[in-house]
Image (tube, rainbow, N blue to C red):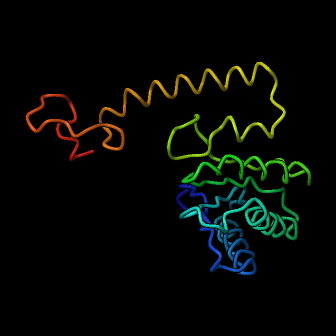
């Protein structure tokens, strides 16, 4: 922090950590930034998996806990980034429900990680953004982004062993046997 290499504090979502621990953690992050002459503006919540406890209600309780510490200290609401991997197709729906909860309480600094439909790892952004009031132009832009992103990933995935078959051992194709990917 003193070198002005500004990290984003990350809270690991887990039912093993009570909300009181999150409250104390948030305060420590604010204090560390303040001690370096900086104001904390954003935090990230990362789930290490997608257990039964990864629900919109549980995530919203975490967001509200973080926001309450900022409010207690007379700070603007934080930007809260949610990062999760979608293992069962429910991530986008959970995220959309989370957006609805945030909107209902006037919390407009929530950012939820997402990607194009059927990307295989992240929330489906078309499901997630269904909870938002996007204009037709914004919706068209999202669809265009999704097609372009998918095309880019298809080109790049030839070097990624998650979607390609093992390249023959004697291949002269850039990327070799994918062993160094």
Q: Is 90 rendered above or below residue 64?
A: above
Image quadrant where one finds the C terminus: top left
Relative to residue 155, is residue 90 depicted above or below? below
Residue 62 in view of the camera? yes
Q: Position of residue 27 (x, y in %)?
A: 73, 74
Quarter of the image for the N terminus: give it. Answer: bottom right
Q: Is residue 163 left or right of residue 89?
A: left
Image coordinates for residue 88, horizontal then vertical, percent = 57, 53
Residue 1 shows up from this direction: no
Q: Position of residue 121 (x, y in %)?
A: 51, 47
The image shows residue 140, relative to residue 129, as above or below, that is above
| Residue at screen point 64% across, 24% down | 143
Residue 52, image quadrant: bottom right
Q: Is residue 68 left or right of residue 111?
A: right
Is residue 7 shown left or right of residue 63? Answer: left
In terms of image quadrants, where is residue 154? top left
Q: Residue at x 23, y 42 (%)?
A: 178
Quadrant of residue 141 within the rendered picture: top right
């Amino acid at each position: 922090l003193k070198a002005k290499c500004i990290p984003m504090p990350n809270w690991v979502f887990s039912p093993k950590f009570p909300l009181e621990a999150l409250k104390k953690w948030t305060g420590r992050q604010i204090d560390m930034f303040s001690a370096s002459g900086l104001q904390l503006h954003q935090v990230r919540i990362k789930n290490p998996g997608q257990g039964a406890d990864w629900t919109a209600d549980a995530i919203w309780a975490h967001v509200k806990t973080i926001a309450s510490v900022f409010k207690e200290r007379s700070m603007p609401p934080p930007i809260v980034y949610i990062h999760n991997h979608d293992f069962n197709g429910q991530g986008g729906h959970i995220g959309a429900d989370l957006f609805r909860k945030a909107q209902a309480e006037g919390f407009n600094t929530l950012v939820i990680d997402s990607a194009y439909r059927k990307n295989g790892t992240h929330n489906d952004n078309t499901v997630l953004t269904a909870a938002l009031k996007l204009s037709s132009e914004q919706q068209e832009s999202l669809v265009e982004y999704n097609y372009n992103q998918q095309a880019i990933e298809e080109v790049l995935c030839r070097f990624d062993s998650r979607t390609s078959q093992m390249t023959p051992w004697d291949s002269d194709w850039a990327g070799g046997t994918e062993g160094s990917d």
